[in-house]
Amino acid sequence: MLIFDFLIFRTKKLTCFLLSRFTNILAGKHIENSILGKLQASSHKLQVIQLEPGKLNTRKLAACSLRLVASLPYLRPMNKEVVLSGIRPTGFLHLGNYFGAMRNYVRMQDEFNCYFFVANWHSLTTHPDTKELKNSVHRVIAENIACGLDPEKVALYIQSDVPEIAELYLYLNMMAYKGELEKTVTFKEKVRLQPDNVNAGLLTYPVLQAADILIHRAVKVPVGKDQEQHLEMARNYAERFNHRYGDVLPLPYAFNYGGELVKILSLDGVGKMSKSENQMNTLYLADEDESIRKKIMKAKTDQGPAEPNAVKPDYIENLFTLMKLVSTADTVQKFEDDFNNSSAGNCVIRYGDMKKQLAEDMIRFIQPIRAKAADIQQNQDLLKKIIRQGADKARASASETLTLVRTAVGMDY
Ligand code: TRP
């Protein structure tokens, strides 16, 4: 494996980029896709190009590049696809976050080249107390690791540690039009919620999010439905950039494993679990045993079904959903039978018993995550090391993209 730093040189016809640190590929701007196949097929040949920064043999490099170049959006043909997602550090992570997002991230880390980050710049748009924000950022990092993300496998980092994102944000702002930003659903909602703080950061929130994604040339973005519009905007900015300056940025799409995400309602059955609101009806990964018990025992139920195979109301279905996630199949089956018909008779389910069982199984599930997250948070040295490691990985990738972007824009003096 050749390890170079990023190099750029120009020949008469071609701007070439040497990106060998990750790909061992020479890439140029004016190259046909048809070369891509050959490039993949002959990947082993790339390793004979022994060039060192400073000792650049331009003629040799130019000759190689003509044989081996690929078009820019496909710069990493031999690598895994890039997955990226961001988590806003406002409030506490809950079961909905775990089963809707983190559990999938953990699966993705073995299949893809993953970047997961804490979106602390985005949080500033609502003017939070930044001392609390610091704790939240640390907690989110710790909880992600406690849920199974391995900082050796993925880049787990804090957005503000990667200044390259801010520079890309600047270029992308020129691709974003005021009218369409004002029409964004999330923006309109924020204007309603905080009419006294309609700042420009709020307006350009989707542009910053696009920069988060495009800075690593990520193509797969695991997010929920509420983020679809932001992703569409990211694709628009990337397309406009490519159209104006040349193909640099691949288009990102929402990505989740097979079909629907698990949807977890709050325990009162009204809306989803929330990081910051309706706390008595949300189960947090940081909740103590007693608090888990209390919340589950207070979850909304009713007098039970009137006949076998009745349609379950949302709040009852939600209890079964939770049980399926943390209890054994036998336990779930017992309560399903009690709901319908079991040896004890029709519709004999006792929600009190079901909730007691669910509470104990939930405690067994949350307890180790809570303990591991607390351990990491208390170990400041370890936390610092993890954060530093994540930032290094993220910056290595981000600075490669930024060099391509600057060169494309013509800001490579
Ligand atoms: N806007 C996302 C949310 O509210 C967080 C986020 C910021 C994000 N940047 C991102 C998600 C980039 C995916 C990719 O949840």
Image (tube, grey):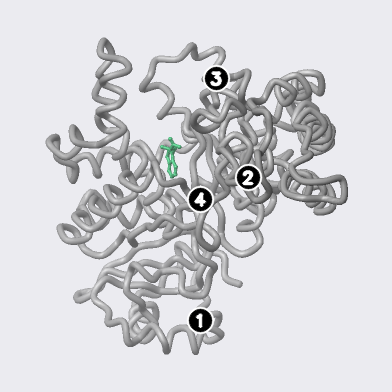
Numbered disc in front, either 2 or 3: 3
Does ligand 1 reach within 8 Å of label 2's beta carbon? no
Distance from disc 4 to disc 2, alpha carbons, whole Å, reads 31 Å
* SS state under label 3: loop
State the separation of the CA atoms marked 2 and 1.
42 Å
Which residue in the structure is indicated by mark 4? 396
Quadrant in which residue 108 is drawn: bottom right
Residue highlighted by disc 3: 278
Q: Position of residue 191 (x, y in %)?
A: 26, 21
From mark 4 to mark 1, how far is it between C-alphas?
21 Å
Disc 1: CA contacts within 10 A as few (<14), some (14-19) or many (>=20): some
Query: Tag 3 or tag 4, which sits nearer the N-term?
Result: 3
Amino acid of disc 1 = Leu
Q: Give the class, few, some or many, for how many residues have Cα within 10 Å of label 3's Cα (few <14, many ≥20).
A: some
Query: Which callout, 4 or 3, points to the residue nearer the camera?
Result: 3
Mark 4 residue crowding within 10 angstroms, few (<14) / some (14–19) / many (20+): some
In this rendering, is residue 313 above or below 402? above
